[in-house]
Image (cartoon, helix red, strand yellow):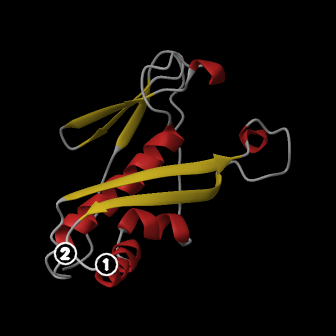
């Protein structure tokens, strides 16, 4: 397969509520009340963890048969640590996650050795995980629309 380009847009609504769209799908994002939002949806860093877990789950479903894994059930719990002083510009620390931890809950009759090989493969082939772990080329531009 060749390179495929995916697109999404994010529109700031009232307060910290953001409406995100990709193709015909919509996802709302907000901040918890403790960070100034109205807690109407997950915040961006929770959504990132959800994107990672979703990606890992999809890779698991896609490749289970190849690894002779009868995937009866698959769940990922993720947590990550962020020093909010970076976001709030209170300290010279990164504003993003410093650590992310995943725990997989896999129901299968496959051997532990097969499952360990399978997990290693799915972590190596998850596009979201790869994007988090490796540097990506990021460019931006902007347009200013003057108020009339």
Residue 111 image point, x, y percent: 27, 80
Residue visible at 41% across and 56% down?
52
**In the rendered view of the protein, which quadrant contains the N terminus?**
bottom left
Residue extending furthest toward the right: 91
At a point 85% along the width and 38% down the height, the residue shown is 90
Q: Which residue shows up at 20% across the image and 82% down it?
A: 67
Q: Quadrant of the rendered structure where residue 60 is?
A: bottom left
> Label 2: which residue?
69
Decide which of tag 1 and tag 2 comes sooner along the chain.
Answer: 2
Q: Secondary structure at mark 2?
A: loop
Question: Which secondary structure, mark 1?
Answer: helix
Task: Pick the residue in front: 138 or 50.
Answer: 50
Q: Is residue 147 left or right of residue 105?
A: right
Please say if 31 is above or below 44: above
- Give the answer, above or below, for where 49 lies relative to 35: below
Q: Residue 71: which quarter of the image?
A: bottom left
Q: Position of residue 138 (x, y in %)?
A: 53, 62
Pointers 1 and 2 in contact (CB under 8 A)? Answer: yes
Out of 75 and 134, give the one closest to the viewer: 75
How dense is the environment of label 1, judged by Cα within 10 Å: few (below 14), some, or many (20 and up)? many
Give the residue number, with chain letter if any, for mark 1: 118
Left/right placement of residue 53 relative to residue 3 reads right
For the residues labelled 1 and 2, the Cα–Cα distance comes to 8 Å
Q: Is residue 40 above or below residue 80?
A: above
Q: Residue at x 71, y 40 (%)?
A: 87
Examine the rendering and report whether any part of residue 57 can be seen. Answer: yes
Q: Quadrant of residue 22?
A: top left
Q: Residues within 10 Å of mark 2 (few under 14, many from 20)?
A: many
């Amino acid at each position: 397969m060749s390179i495929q380009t995916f697109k999404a847009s994010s529109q700031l609504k009232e307060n910290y509520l953001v409406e995100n769209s990709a193709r015909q799908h919509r996802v709302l994002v907000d901040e918890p009340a403790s960070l100034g939002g109205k807690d109407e949806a997950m915040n961006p860093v929770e959504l990132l963890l959800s994107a990672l877990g979703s990606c890992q789950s999809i890779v698991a479903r896609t490749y289970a048969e190849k690894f002779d894994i009868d995937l009866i059930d698959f769940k990922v719990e993720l947590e990550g640590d962020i020093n909010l002083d970076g976001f709030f510009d209170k300290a010279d620390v990164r504003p993003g996650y410093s650590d992310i931890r995943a725990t997989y809950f896999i129901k299968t009759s496959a051997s532990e050795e097969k499952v360990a090989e399978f997990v290693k493969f799915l972590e190596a082939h998850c596009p979201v995980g790869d994007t988090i772990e490796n540097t990506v080329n990021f460019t931006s531009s902007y347009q200013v629309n003057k108020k009339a």
